Amino acid sequence: MSFDEYKKVIDKISNYTNYLYLHVLGEPLIHPNINEFIDYANKNKININLTSNGYLIDKIKTKNIRQLNISLHSYSEKYNILLDKYLDKIFNKVDELKDMTYISYRIWLKNKNTKDILDKLNKKYSCNLTIDILEKRANIKLEKNIFLSVSKEFIWPSLNNNYYNDNGTCYGLSDHIGILVDGTIIPCCLDSKGIINLGNIFVDNLIDIIESKRFNDMFINFKNNTKCEELCKHCKFL
């Protein structure tokens, strides 16, 4: 998305939200204008929440970030960086940001690196995290403004997966919408391919999307614990 396109998005959403999350199953720090994106939203009184895998965390040059989520479970040796170097780089940036930014380290998947990551967190924050503790708690405060978010793996929505349930709800539409790089408006960030296309932010007014039949059919059905879209029936997030 170009900076001009991004500014159009900000102009169209500014009357509807105070928060913008710069991620839809992608790595936002890849974008060459990421700092300008963050600062422009902040200038327009929109709080930025950012989710990153941490590899490019040095790309952050601004402090105008409300919350930074760092997916530590993304670490892999295949990217040719030692775990110590990966975490030290993250810790250094967190130390720069923590006075103004909420930091949420994420361990949503457990793998062979989980214990080593916990050992590094224990040393950094003088705590006593264990695998057993992760099994029992969802959010752990490490120090002021710094937290560890723990979750479990879920089935990502796909028309081709084996999960199917037409009962259930979602925060999509009542709590948030997603906007893809081409402007496609989707009900939630898990629909990264834009299968449930509600319109396009570059050509449609947001109020027309909100008042559309498809939007309201989904919204009302979710309130009644029913999924009316086929993709949603293949999603086990909630």
Image (tube, grey):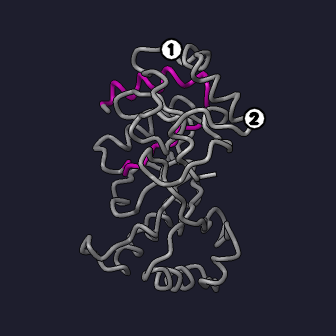
**Amino acid of disc 2:** Asn
Q: Nearer the viewer, residue 198 or 75?
A: 198
For the point 46% across and 43% down, the residue is 22
Judged by depth in the image, the label closer to the viewer, 2 or 1, is: 2
Q: Is residue 82 left or right of residue 224?
A: left
Q: Is residue 60 left or right of residue 94?
A: left
Q: Secondary structure at mark 1?
A: loop
User: Residue 139 in the image: x percent, y percent?
Assistant: 67, 66
Does residue 213 show up magenta in the picture? no
User: Residue 54 in the image: x percent, y percent?
Assistant: 40, 63
* 119 is higher (above) or lower (below) than 68: below
* 120 is higher (above) or lower (below) than 211: below
Seen as rendered, the residue at the extreme right is: 224
Quadrant assignment, res 222: top right
For the point 74% across and 34% down, the residue is 223
**Amino acid of disc 1:** Asn
**Residue that label 2 marks:** 224
User: Residue 66 in the image: x percent, y percent?
Assistant: 57, 48
Q: Nearer the viewer, residue 155 or 69?
A: 155
* 73 is higher (above) or lower (below) than 124: above
For the point 41% across and 74% down, the residue is 87
First along the sequence among labels 2 and 1: 1
Give the magenta-colored segment's residue range. 2-28
Does residue 11 show up magenta in the picture? yes
Q: Secondary structure at mark 2?
A: loop
Q: Nearer the viewer, residue 220 or 148?
A: 220
**Label drawn at residue 169:** none
* 160 is higher (above) or lower (below) than 33: below
**Residue that label 1 marks:** 205
For the point 30% across and 30% down, the residue is 2
User: Residue 155 in the image: x percent, y percent?
Assistant: 51, 57
Mark 2 vs mark 1, CA separation in Å: 27 Å
